[in-house]
Amino acid sequence: MPHDSTMRTGEGHGRAGVTGKIRLSQRGWLFDLDGTIYLGDSLIPGADATIAALRAAGRRVAFLSNKPLQTREDYARKLTGLGIPTGPDEVITSSLVLARHLVTLDPGAPVFVIGEPPLIAELAAHGFETRADHRVRWVVIAFDRTFDYAKLNTALQAVRAGARLIATNPDRTCPTPEGEIPDCAGMIAAVEAVTGQAVEVVVGKPSSIILDVALRTLGVTAGECVIVGDRLETDIVMGRCYGLTTVLVLSGITRPDDPRIAEIHPDAVLPSIRELIK
Amino acid sequence: MPHDSTMRTGEGHGRAGVTGKIRLSQRGWLFDLDGTIYLGDSLIPGADATIAALRAAGRRVAFLSNKPLQTREDYARKLTGLGIPTGPDEVITSSLVLARHLVTLDPGAPVFVIGEPPLIAELAAHGFETRADHRVRWVVIAFDRTFDYAKLNTALQAVRAGARLIATNPDRTCPTPEGEIPDCAGMIAAVEAVTGQAVEVVVGKPSSIILDVALRTLGVTAGECVIVGDRLETDIVMGRCYGLTTVLVLSGITRPDDPRIAEIHPDAVLPSIRELIK
């Protein structure tokens, strides 16, 4: 394991269980949520103690989710309820990043959203005109459990009238306590297939767009940052591409015998977040 | 234009307007429907006279549609109503061909159908157990205007439990009088993207599977047969691949300046079916 300079966490910071050694010395720490910090509504054992230890040692921590189904406030509330006190500013979602990115491309544009209410609200809050018809300049594609033929048709008509395509995240499936369910890749593929037009930009992991927002939030460079996640093709690929230290945890979607582990080669592979502390 | 041996159609067969020369001498004639014989509910001018002339000259005619939304009886009734008297046996749909093909692969299997009631009825009529859940051996994917997230999720769960994928037709869009709407390619792409599994077989045009059924129906070989259609990537590609004479009509989806016309190179390009008769 590289970067193995460990430091004793500050005992006496008034937190219980913050006594182990952190395995990596970087200042910035990004954590995926689903499959890394919790599974559904259950905390992954040790996640609270690990985050507390990092914070007690002065490390900067943020949470990074490709899931556009909840607001930052929702995630902050959930994490706090699970024993990891968190403010909305410490959470970065693909919805937020998409809205911010689209502001740089086409502020105030009319948009049609294949997505759920929190994403639509985020876009409205960023000044976009969210419409239910095809008279738009952008079709925003997201993980949408209310996706249907009528939305696919509206997307087709919008593209035929000149609209461009942008998406939140490339995930094929989303893990839930009941198993995997279809994620944004299904919606992207359907729209691309019927329109014959490729999505121009997918802002979520492994894109540099979400990473830039995360690094600015933490105030660190990529080289000073660790990303901890359960998904090779998003968390770990992004980290490898942009020079972060990468830690794959096996508490989520990736099986220990996945042949891609050797290919993509994370800096460390751990059973779970608990083992970040010796 | 090859095969330009023409013959005078049998005058005195008691049909009005059956007096022109047929431009091609082949015995078997396959016609696409949407965009070739009619557009929506309107006959393409001259389609009735052309079909009447071919029949009067003893040619064998059948109609071939990738669209799994109506039964053969529906199409026969529609054609008859438009002035082209037709029986159900002269119509070949991707629904029928899929049901027959699946009988050869896995007779009586439980299937989950992403499709509309006529396809479900066709499968039931061929002895399949059509189920609404994921406990199936096949997921059948079709053009489905009632496609939604719940169906996509059922397909994912079925594939995770071992189900195989088969589809009716590869069309991206379907022309309607109001414009193009999403076709089966959207449903196929969504299922393939979330499952990570490719559809094993697509029975509709340009597959040899639907062509075999059509040639058996007509009792002719590929070399004795003409296919007339408006779509390059299905009608004309199939004809070119399997040795039929191909006639592209510009009355449907293909624009005269489409660069693929020169690439795929149909034997003849005509404004519409009317011009098959001199």
Image: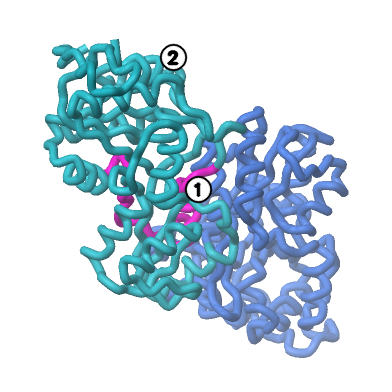
Chain colours: A blue, B cyan
Nearer-the-camera pick, B87 or B232: B87
Asked if badge 2 and badge 1 are on a common chain, one would say: yes
Mark 2 to mark 1 CA distance (whole Å)? 26 Å
Residue A6 pos. (x, y %): 62, 73
Which is more N-terminal, label 1 or label 2? 1
At x 65%, y 49%, the residue is A150
- Whether residue B193 is in magenta: the answer is yes
Q: Which residues are magenta?
A: B182-207
Q: Amino acid under label 2?
A: Asp
Query: Is A217 positioned to the left or the right of B184 in the image?
Result: right
In this view, A206 is above or below B113: above
Secondary structure beneath label 2? loop
Q: Which residue bears the numbered disc 1?
A: B186
In this view, B44 is above or below A128: above
Picture quadrant where residue B21 is located: top left
- Whether residue A55 is in magenta: the answer is no
Picture quadrant where residue A145 is located: bottom right
In this view, A106 is above or below B8: below
Q: Which residue bears the numbered disc 2?
A: B257
Query: Is B224 positioned to the left or the right of A200 in the image?
Result: left
At x 35%, y 58%, the residue is B166
**Badge 2, how many Cα within 10 Å: few under 14, some, many 20+?**
few
The C terminus of chain A, quarter of image: bottom right
Residue A232 is tagged as none
Query: Is A217 positioned to the left or the right of B110 in the image?
Result: right
Nearer-the-camera pick, A203 or B205: B205
**Badge 1, how many Cα within 10 Å: few under 14, some, many 20+?**
many
Q: Amino acid under label 1?
A: Gly
